Amino acid sequence: AQSVSQHNHHVILSEAASLELGCNYSYGGTVNLFWYVQYPGQHLQLLLKYFSGDPLVKGIKGFEAEFIKSKFSFNLRKPSVQWSDTAEYFCAVLPTGRRALTFGSGTRLQVQP
Amino acid sequence: EPEVTQTPSHQVTQMGQEVILRCVPISNHLYFYWYRQILGQKVEFLVSFYNNEISEKSEIFDDQFSVERPDGSNFTLKIRSTKLEDSAMYFCASSDERNEQFFGPGTRLTVL
């Protein structure tokens, strides 16, 4: 069975700092990869996705993620965070041909003004 | 922008009672899902539904759970006899064939 690890449980940054959130998965086959964000009091929203092609994917609000197949990683990055990026971020993996997303435990990002 | 809606936002029930959680998926989506998140734990997949039948389910989705699409717009999750450990946030999601799953705001189920 597949699994997803998010090593950073709680990250505190100042505005304008750069962000990188780690995500590693374990699965032997091909996968689709996702980052979801949950702002305080709101529901899970899709931030970005990787299905195939260019391993560097860009999402909404200036976020990007890079799929490194050899490392089974899909790290989320943003060059300069804003206070409004304060949220919980979830990495998820979906084996090709399946429908069940497997989520990581989430990383709570707190951006201080 | 179309969105998934869920009702109620919070449901409190007694142990052993039946609950039905309701969802209205995005109108042109054909795949529907239920996930749950127990407080402090990961979001876990329960079931996926397509073409009026279950296409995939997890070990959690045992005989006390059932899903239904009773009409053209609603998608429901029924828990027949609730247990304390069923207390969780239940999320509905829907997707088209590309499998980008869009989530609803969730129903917080509290079993007393």
Image (cartoon, coloured by chain):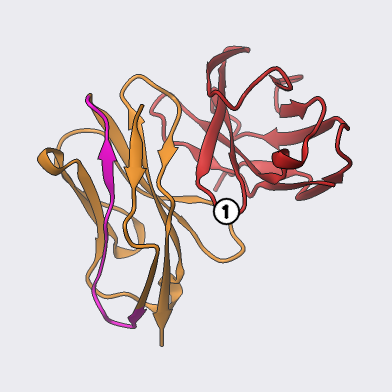
- In this rendering, the count of numbered labels is 1
Chain with colour red in the figure: B
Residue type (three-letter) at the residue carrying disc 1: His
Name the residue rendered at 44%, 25% in the picture.
Answer: A99
Could you tell whether B85 is left or right of A42 in the image? right
- Which residue occupies the foreground of this view, A108 or B39? B39
Q: Chain of mark 1?
A: A
Q: Can you say whether A7 is above or below B56 in the image?
A: below
Under circle 1, the secondary element is loop
Q: Can you say whether B27 is above or below A4 in the image?
A: above
Whether residue A19 is in magenta: the answer is yes
Q: Position of residue A28 (x, y in %)?
A: 22, 26
Q: Which residue is mark 1?
A: A43
Q: Position of residue B60 (x, y in %)?
A: 59, 27
Q: Quadrant of residue A18?
A: bottom left
Name the residue rendered at 62%, 24% in the picture.
Answer: B61
Whether residue A97 is in magenta: the answer is no
Q: Residue furthest front?
A: B84
How crowded is the residue under tag 1: few (<14 C-alpha within 10 Å), some, or many (20+)?
some
Q: Residue furthest bottom?
A: A113
Magenta stretch bounds: A13-28
Chain with colour orange in the figure: A
Q: Position of residue A87 (x, y in %)?
A: 47, 66
Could you tell whether B100 is left or right of B57 in the image? left
Name the residue rendered at 28%, 40% in the picture.
Answer: A25
Q: Can you say whether B54 is above or below B86 in the image?
A: above
Q: Quadrant of residue A79?
A: bottom left
Q: Position of residue A12 (x, y in %)?
A: 37, 77
- Which residue occupies the foreground of this view, B73 or B69? B69
